[in-house]
Image (spheres, rainbow, N blue to C red):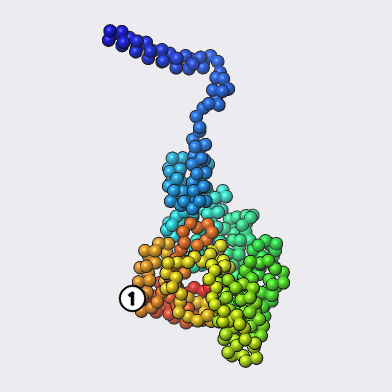
Amino acid sequence: MKQKENKRFFYYVLGCSLSLCIPCICGYLMPLPSFAIQATPVTTADSGQSLYDKAQKLFQEKNYKQAKDSLNQLVAKYPMGDFIPKARLLLANLQEDFTVSTVQFRELATEYSARPEGEEAQKDLGSRYYLADKYDEAADSYKEFLDHYPKSNSMPEVRYWYASSLLALDKNQEALDEYQKVLNDSPDSPWAPKALLGTGNAYFKMKKYQDAEKRYLKILDQYHFYDEMNLVYLKLGQTYESEQKWKEAHAAYQTLIQQYPQAFEVSEARGRLQELEKEHADLPPAAEAQAPEPTATPVVVASEPTVTPVPTETAQEAAPETDAISKPFHVQVGVYSKKLYVDKAQKGVRKAGYKPYVVTVKAGDMPYPMYKVRVGDFADKVSAQKFADELTKKLKEKAIVVED
């Protein structure tokens, strides 16, 4: 009985084997039908693309950890896929550690220099450096982009940030020349009014106040829908003060407060109104100067690439103990991507006898914010540099001067 069952099983297996082999043999004699070709399994490239699409969707949904896990799996499994450059670029953007992210962007820019991903990586590298107030490195990265991609659609944007990096390095005339190139080459682009504001700021730093005034007024005249008019009115007010045009300065600050009550610059404008009214009795008192501080989220400022100030958990501590008078220079201890290092830096500053505050910034393409630990606000760069040198000696770490 048992032998019969074994035979039945043997014949069953043999039959299955023959049923599989016969089509294979026939395959040598006749082509496979079209429906058989269509039924082939999904290719490696298709499945890899699907995984990349999934990771991209997770990124857009701000599920950064899952997106990062999916991308790492993708790169490991399909290292030769056509989507790998995009995946690695997205991974660099997801990298929380500043140093690691810049290394990855530089590697991508070099490896894919002939591809759009390399171009994007070079631009992102400059943005990361600029956000961290590393203006020398930012300028070098942007200059490299301008040299390698002269026909890029991003030229106006990159040239603008290159000029802004030069301006932050006090290379005012060079910055002015680069801003002017943006205006000459791309007069109808969104970067034209930004570049015009940049030229005004460059002239202001060079103490050519009449030239600065003309640039600011030109923005008001030609770019009615420019989204940073709050900055224009603030700079115009400061320029009028430097020219001792008190009434015009008073009017510029009032316009800023009335038209942009939720702008980040309102606090400074109110402070200047108060000072002007104290010093010049002929100026009419402005009720807006006594109004409560705005509580809305500050507007995006022009001094950083698509950056929005982000509220921090230490908001009370982050507010420096200074008045609203313009004090554009600050001493920066460091820029960090992790709160652990922020806390350590703040502890060191307190131990040295000073009160730190934190400025948090986040660019539009960055999933994680960066934290800048700063100390003090200064009206002039000389005073700020003197304090930075003193703080460097006490902390045994380099403190630098940054300007808003």
Disc 1 residue type (three-letter) = Lys
Quadrant of the rendered structure where residue 355 is? bottom left
Mark 1, residue position:
351
Picture coordinates of residue 239 (x, y %)?
Answer: 63, 80
Identity of the residue drawn at 42% across and 64% down: 336
Quadrant of the rendered structure where residue 352 is? bottom left
- Image quadrant holding the N terminus, namely top left
What is the number of callouts on the image? Answer: 1
Position of residue 137 in the picture relative to residue 190 (left or right): left
Picture coordinates of residue 95 (x, y %)?
Answer: 45, 55
Picture coordinates of residue 38 (x, y %)?
Answer: 55, 26
273 w.r.t. 103: above or below:
below
What residue occupies the far right of the structure in this picture?
A: 221
What residue occupies the far bottom of the structure in this picture?
A: 281
Identity of the residue drawn at 54% across and 22% down: 36
Camera-side residue: 110 or 90? 90
185 w.r.t. 6: above or below:
below
280 w.r.t. 42: above or below:
below
- Residue 165 shows in this picture: no
Identity of the residue drawn at 70% across and 62% down: 188
Position of residue 152 in the picture relative to residue 53 (left or right): right
Quadrant of the rendered structure where residue 317 is? bottom left
Picture coordinates of residue 216 (x, y %)?
Answer: 66, 74
Q: Secondary structure at mark 1?
A: helix
